[in-house]
Image: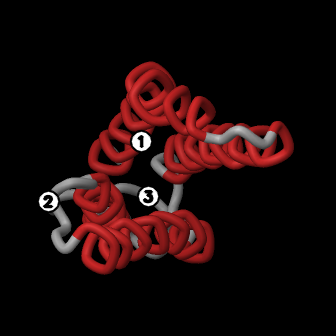
Amino acid sequence: MIWTRLAAVLMGATLLIHVFAGGPEVHAPMLAALSDPGLGAFASILWHAVSVVLAVLTVGLWGLAGRRDPLLEVVLSGVQLGFAGLFLFYGLTRLGAVWPMPQWVIFLAIPALTRFGQTRRRPDGEPRTLS
């Protein structure tokens, strides 16, 4: 349970970083670079949609920590692995390296931590004991 809770806390931290650091560093400059108000509106929608997804992932991981639910784990991890793939792909194809956008690290680490946490539960959902 502790490992999946830790994954939820890390996802919550990711949400806070996205909102409070990413907003001024990425969202605001993106809006300033877009002269078309319609494109600016779409950029804001997409930015805030990511915020919503990160919030839902945080809540989902917190709930998953209390039980074993393979389907929920696949869905939550699938979204994160998709994000990781996008950061890796566009880092390599547009920037020539993966480190300018290192967000892929957290989007790989949290599903790994979640998987580890879920393996610490018995099939009936109860935590494994050392007995």
Q: In the rendered structure, which disc, 3 or 1, sits on the residue that comes first in sequence?
A: 1
Q: Residues within 10 Å of mark 2 (few under 14, many from 20)?
A: few
Q: How is the image coloured?
A: secondary structure
**How far apart are the alpha carbons under marks 3 and 1?**
23 Å
| Dot 1 amino acid type | Met
Q: Nearer the viewer, mark 2 or mark 1?
A: 1
How crowded is the residue under tag 3: few (<14 C-alpha within 10 Å), some, or many (20+)? few
Q: Is residue 131 left or right of residue 103?
A: left
Can residue 129 be seen at all in this image of the molecule?
Answer: yes
User: What's the residue at 43%, 58% (across, down)?
Assistant: 126
Q: Find disc 3 in the rendering and name its residue.
A: 126
Describe the element under mark 1 as helix, strand or loop.
Answer: helix
Q: Quadrant of residue 97?
A: bottom left
User: Does any portion of residue 128 appear in the rendered image?
Assistant: no
The local secondary structure at tag 3 comes to: loop
Task: Please name the residue shown 39% across and 37% down the image.
Answer: 14
User: Dot 1: within a 10 Å radius of its alpha carbon, few (fewer than 14), some, or many (20 or more) residues?
Assistant: many
> Measured from the top left, where is residue 128 in percent x and y?
28, 61
Residue ID for mark 1: 11
- Reply above or below: 122 against 53: below
Asked which quadrant contains residue 85, the reply is bottom left
Direction from residue 80 to residue 121 in the image, left or right: left
Residue 41 placed where, x, y %?
80, 39
Decide which of tag 2 and tag 1 comes sooner along the chain.
Answer: 1
Residue under label 2, please give it.
Answer: 130
Instruction: Please provide percent x and percent y for residue 82.
Output: 48, 73
- Choose mark 3 or mark 1, whichever is in front: 1
**Residue shown at the point (37%, 68%) measured from the top left:** 84
Up-down relation of residue 98 to residue 27 (above or below): below
Q: CA distance from mark 3 to mark 2?
A: 13 Å
**Foreground residue among 91 and 20:** 91
